[in-house]
Image (cartoon, rainbow, N blue to C red):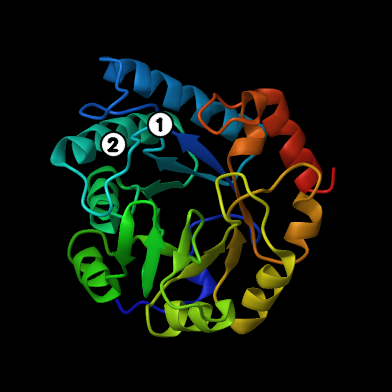
Amino acid sequence: MARTNLRQVLPFNDPQPLIGMVHLRPLPGTLYFDDSLDAVIDAALADAYHLQQAGFNGLIVENFGDIPFRKSRVELHTVAAMTAVVQEIRREIELPVGINVLRNDPFAAIAVASATGANFIRVNVLTGVMATDQGLIEGEAAEVFTYMERVAPWVTLYADIHVKHAAPLVPRPITEVAQETTYRGGADGLIVTGTQTGGGVDMEELTAVREAVVVPVLAGSGVTVDNVQSILSTCDGAIVGSSLKVDGIAGNPVDPELAREFVEIGRGG
């Protein structure tokens, strides 16, 4: 079945989904792994459960603890570990699940989704060239979609534009990047972020991107209880991480009370 780039392909039961982040602890083979994959799984399940109980519409599982990140292809044991974690989440949690493999390995994300039945992936660099702290990262849209059609054709792809912790090799208006990522790159939805983890989104950029494309546009960083209503008045949903965590630190556990408060305010309660 051909991809359509229409809102109907998105896996959520709400036209403005709130998507919470499950930031994984360091995985096996990485610098700060503490020798217990079971502990990684337990922490991920706890965060996923709290997000579901709070009323979120979906979650993204990300290898956030695997610093320093590989620029593109991760090693096989990382794919295996993420598959093990996501499989447990899928058994216990009813929410749509997304995969992001840092720094930019959409092929690994697709492989995890293929094995676990996850619903969507996030790709930090789908098109163009970004200068990052890992070096230059080039988009591989054609190869990504070819692989996806082979092993996980049901998966929806959200692509960052002007992704955080990076800068375009050649500065270009974000609206041009948004249009090319959508209409030439094939993204099902776009993500607009601030410049760093937890950094606020430029509202003018968010509005401009929303007006430039027909696919859903999500705010991908810096969404808090104080600005979620204004952000949702501008775009089609939000990905939320740091502001839901204990002490506002992305690597900390989800705070259940903060998560519930966020959803209540975001839904106008």
- Earlier residue among tags 2 and 1: 1
Q: Which residue is mark 1?
A: 24
Q: How many residues crowd around disc 2 within 10 Å: few (fewer than 14), some, or many (20 or more)?
A: many
- Up-down: is 269 above or below 160? above
The picture places residue 73, in percent across and down from the top left corner, at 21, 52
Q: Nearer the viewer, residue 40 or 201?
A: 201
Q: Name the residue type under label 1.
A: Leu
Q: Is residue 241 left or right of residue 62?
A: right
Q: Quadrant of the N terminus?
A: bottom left
Q: Name the residue type under label 2.
A: Met
Q: Is residue 22 left or right of residue 254?
A: left
Q: Secondary structure at mark 1?
A: loop
Q: Is residue 125 left or right of residue 114?
A: right
Q: Is residue 186 visible?
A: yes
Residue 82: mark = 2
Specify the quadrant of the image occupied by residue 168. bottom left
Residue at (38% x, 48% y) in the render: 99
Label count reads 2
- Up-down: is 38 above or below 107? above
Specify the quadrant of the image occupied by residue 140. bottom left
Distance between the alpha carbons at the discs numbered 2 and 1: 9 Å
Q: Secondary structure at mark 2?
A: helix
Residue at (19% x, 59% y) in the render: 151
Query: CB of mark 2 within 8 Å of CB of mark 1?
Result: yes
Q: Is residue 110 left or right of residue 15?
A: left
Q: Nearer the viewer, residue 151 or 125?
A: 125
The picture places residue 105, in percent across and down from the top left corner, at 28, 54
Q: How many residues crowd around disc 1 within 10 Å: few (fewer than 14), some, or many (20 or more)?
A: many
The picture places residue 6, in percent across and down from the top left corner, at 50, 76
